[in-house]
Image: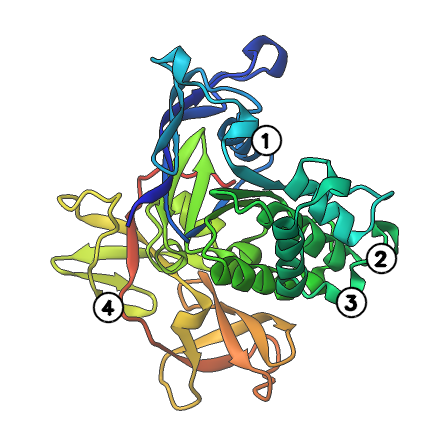
Amino acid sequence: MKSTLLLKNILFNYDKSKLGLNRPILNNLNLELEKGEIGCILGSSGGGKTTLLRTITGFINPDKGQIVIDNKIVYDHNEKNSVIPSEKRKVGMVFQDYALFPHLNVAENILFGLTKGNINKATVNQKIRLKEMLSLTGLSSLSKAYIDDLSGGQKQRVALARALAPTPKLILFDEPFSNLDPSLRQPLARDVRDMLKETDSTALFVTHDQSEAFSIADKIGILKDGFFQQWDTPYLIYHEPKNIDIAKFIGQGALINGYRKDTHIETALGSFPLRLNQSSNQNIGGEMKVLIRPDDIIHDDESTLTATVVKKIFRGADFLYVLKLNSHEQVLSFVPSHHDHPLYKPIGIKLEVDHVVTFDSNMESTIF
């Protein structure tokens, strides 16, 4: 399958003297998205996520590197004549604030993207495409409505329809759901994913919301220090993080102490076969850190292994329990809500893990 987006060794450096930076905002960054894939970039504020989108669109040019869209080089630092302007890159963009025209109705906003502003000269084919986009995004009954009369979710659908209408090779989304009520974000994110998949569109999202990223993406990139610390499937990002930073940043979990003995690791929760994380040095023995997710620990009244409930958060279908082990370390566990145990009392637990992810205890870690 061919790549729709390929970034090679992208370097971008703002004026350090003004921003107080001691490193490039994008530093030797690499990325690949295949046709029909949806990627998502996660990282801290000011970490370069939006800057990366701007380099792809051509709003700004990197200091070094190469950008390839649909097998066509649109930027190459070594070939100045290869720089293709943003309006010719066939890249759609959906902005955080929608960037819709309030004086135009829904249909006219979508036609604007198709006709490059000449909505009164729309061709028959363009009008057919408009109807397809209205149907795809569920906006057919609102085609004559004006933007100020729409909800946030409806505005986002208009923005998506306008971006999809010209059949771009790639669509970029910059924090597209951040202005919506929390209750609307995940349902709309799933709807947007379905629409992108139905049209076999390739897309790249920027977000700070992990739940959105996991709802949308085929691939997730953890951006820190200007490059991707991990570019992987959501499953592997969650279950096999490449370093302690990612383990702490993604999802919920705890890092407890372990001690390596040959091919096993001993912890306060028992002994496990050792499977070293890719970042670990397999020749190092002794103390290690073990990642335990809440879904690894199952409540079991019959178990001889116990932990004390020190905090609980009711979530409807379940509680999130904070449990203190005999080692005084704390772990998390999802427990069905009909098991409402009192605080500061022990409960039985058992582990259900296919493998444990371990890190060398001397690895430096900083939290996003």
65 in relation to 222, above or below: above
Q: Where residue 206 sits: x, y (%)?
A: 55, 43
Rounded to the nearest whole Å, what is the CA distance between mark 2 and mark 4? 63 Å
Q: Is residue 28 visible?
A: no
Please name whichever residue, 48 or 294, is drawn nearer the observer in this view of the structure.
48
Q: Are marks 4 and 3 in contact (CB under 8 Å)?
A: no
Mark 4 or mark 3, which is nearer to you?
A: 3
- Residue at the disc numbered 3: 141
The amino acid type of the residue labelled 2 equals: Ala
Mark 2 or mark 4, which is nearer to you?
A: 2
SS under mark 2: loop
SS under mark 3: helix
15 in relation to 286, above or below: above
Rounded to the nearest whole Å, what is the CA distance between mark 1 and mark 4? 41 Å
Q: Where residue 338 sits: x, y (%)?
A: 59, 89
Rounded to the nearest whole Å, what is the CA distance between mark 4 and mark 3? 61 Å
Q: In the rendering, which numbered label is found on residue 7?
A: none
The amino acid type of the residue labelled 1 equals: Gly
- Residue at the disc numbered 4: 271
- Residue at the disc numbered 1: 46
- Residue at the disc numbered 2: 145
Disc on the earlier residue, 3 or 1: 1
Instruction: Identify the residue shown where x is 50% and y is 69%.
Output: 323
Badge 1: few (under 14), some or many (20 or more) residues near its Cα, within 10 Å? Answer: few
Q: Where residue 234 sits: x, y (%)?
A: 41, 57
Q: Is residue 123 left or right of residue 287?
A: right
79 in relation to 241, above or below: above
